[in-house]
Image: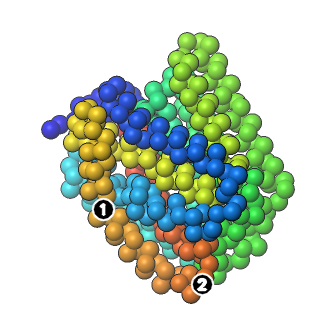
């Protein structure tokens, strides 16, 4: 079965309406529900044991989170109807070279590697949301690259900067654990956690959020569809409240697993011919089952690489009774995989007309 060009070009040529509705039901609405319920339960989070606070990150190793990047080797071929063999070879080399170089960076200069990881994640989570707005929510108020870039900065900044503004101690503890794994000095991170830095981060992000909403409202007044803008505004409000009231580890773990990863999986389903066929019949479960099958082998390989990393880091977390150290190890492994993943997604953005 060949994939139609309209399905491949999910932004420059919109997804078929039935596919968009199915993906919205399977990926977008569940993310609203998950984060909304978490906000409602926020008053009780303080009494949760650590095992539950860290549970979303633990589950992400097998459910949505880590697997969402484990189909990168097939994504280029499916996006442009190309050769799967060539796609696997190119992406494999990309992961080996980019991922390997970035992992080596952690051993040499962990502080700058950690700062780069936060900046990279900011960009990547922002680009994921921009695609979802355009392809899954069919927004009309982001017609230019400048407006999409503003949305990217705001959307990616929320999980990276809002926790810094509202929960600096918990944020600093996790980032310091990154550095400590490689015998770096956590004190080098101090300038990022001063009251001034937090004010600039939180206040600047809030100002950009207001600007993005205002520009979108102006577009609506000029004829853009109002409902998608209202959804955009509601999502931004939800995300601000979500990251303000929940501790960073729990909030980012839930966001990574049930928001970012789930929306990227929806994107991958839209370019998979067999998954798209299932989506046109409303069979989201069948499409997700196909994704799980495709993602399973490299998810397993990634977990083996993480085990090797645990043995290689100077301060092995296996000798520490510290949840932060174990989380840091997992996230450093994710970081090494994220850089080549971002290259693949950026290429998809270009081919599909996001920019």
275 relative to 53, above or below: above
Secondary structure beneath dot 2 equals loop
Q: Is residue 292 left or right of residue 34?
A: left
Which of the colour schemes (rainbow, by chain, secondary structure, one colour) is used?
rainbow
Of 76 and 161, the residue lying toward us? 161
Check the image and name the residue furthest to the bottom: 319
Q: Quadrant of residue 68?
A: bottom left
Residue at 60% of width from left, 58% of height from top?
250
Q: Position of residue 257 (x, y in %)?
A: 48, 54
* Residue where numbered disc 1 is placed: 296
Kindly report the distance in space between the C-alpha atoms of the residues bearing marks 1 and 2: 30 Å
Residue at 34% of width from left, 45% of height from top?
268
353 relative to 180, above or below: above
Of 115 and 97, the residue lying toward us? 115
Q: Dot 2 surroundings within 10 Å: few (below 14), some, or many (20 or more)?
A: few
Secondary structure beneath dot 1 equals helix
Residue at 57% of width from left, 64% of height from top?
52
Residue at 66% of width from left, 28% of height from top?
213
Q: Is residue 225 left or right of residue 300?
A: right
Of 75 and 322, the residue lying toward us? 322
Q: Position of residue 158 (x, y in %)?
A: 64, 46
Q: Is residue 45 left or right of residue 97?
A: right
Dot 1 or dot 2: first in sequence order is: 1
Q: Is residue 349 left or right of residue 167?
A: left
Q: Position of residue 179 (x, y in %)?
A: 64, 74
* Residue where numbered disc 2 is placed: 320
């Amino acid at each position: 079965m060949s994939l139609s060009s309209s399905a491949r070009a999910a932004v420059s040529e919109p997804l078929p309406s039935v596919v968009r509705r199915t993906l919205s039901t399977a990926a977008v609405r569940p993310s609203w529900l998950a984060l909304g319920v978490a906000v409602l339960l926020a008053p009780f989070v303080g009494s949760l044991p650590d095992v539950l606070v860290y549970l979303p990150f633990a589950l992400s190793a097998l459910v949505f989170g880590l697997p969402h990047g484990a189909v990168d080797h097939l994504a280029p071929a499916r996006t442009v109807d190309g050769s799967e063999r060539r796609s696997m070879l190119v992406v494999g080399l990309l992961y080996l070279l980019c991922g390997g170089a970035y992992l080596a960076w952690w051993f040499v200069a962990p502080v700058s590697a950690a700062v780069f990881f936060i900046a990279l994640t900011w960009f990547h989570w922002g680009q994921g949301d921009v695609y979802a707005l355009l392809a899954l929510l069919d927004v009309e108020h982001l017609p230019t690259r400048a407006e999409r870039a503003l949305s990217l900065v705001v959307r990616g900044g929320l999980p990276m900067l809002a926790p810094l503004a509202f929960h600096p101690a918990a944020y600093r503890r996790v980032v310091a654990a990154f550095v400590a794994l490689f015998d770096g000095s956590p004190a080098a991170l101090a300038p990022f956690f001063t009251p001034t830095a937090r004010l600039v981060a939180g206040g600047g992000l809030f100002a950009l959020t207001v600007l993005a909403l205002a520009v979108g409202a102006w577009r609506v007044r000029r004829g853009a569809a109002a409902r998608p803008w209202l959804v955009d505004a509601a999502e931004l409000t939800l995300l601000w409240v979500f990251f303000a009231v929940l501790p960073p580890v729990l909030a980012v773990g839930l966001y990574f697993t049930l928001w970012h990863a789930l929306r990227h999986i929806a994107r991958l389903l839209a370019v998979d011919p067999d998954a798209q066929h299932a989506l046109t019949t409303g069979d989201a479960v069948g499409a997700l089952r196909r994704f799980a099958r495709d993602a399973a082998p490299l998810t397993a390989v990634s977990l083996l690489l993480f085990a090797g990393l645990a043995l290689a880091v100077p301060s092995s977390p296996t000798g520490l009774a510290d949840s932060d150290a174990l989380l840091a190890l997992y996230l450093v492994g994710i970081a090494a995989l994220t850089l080549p993943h971002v290259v693949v997604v950026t290429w998809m953005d270009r081919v599909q007309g996001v920019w």
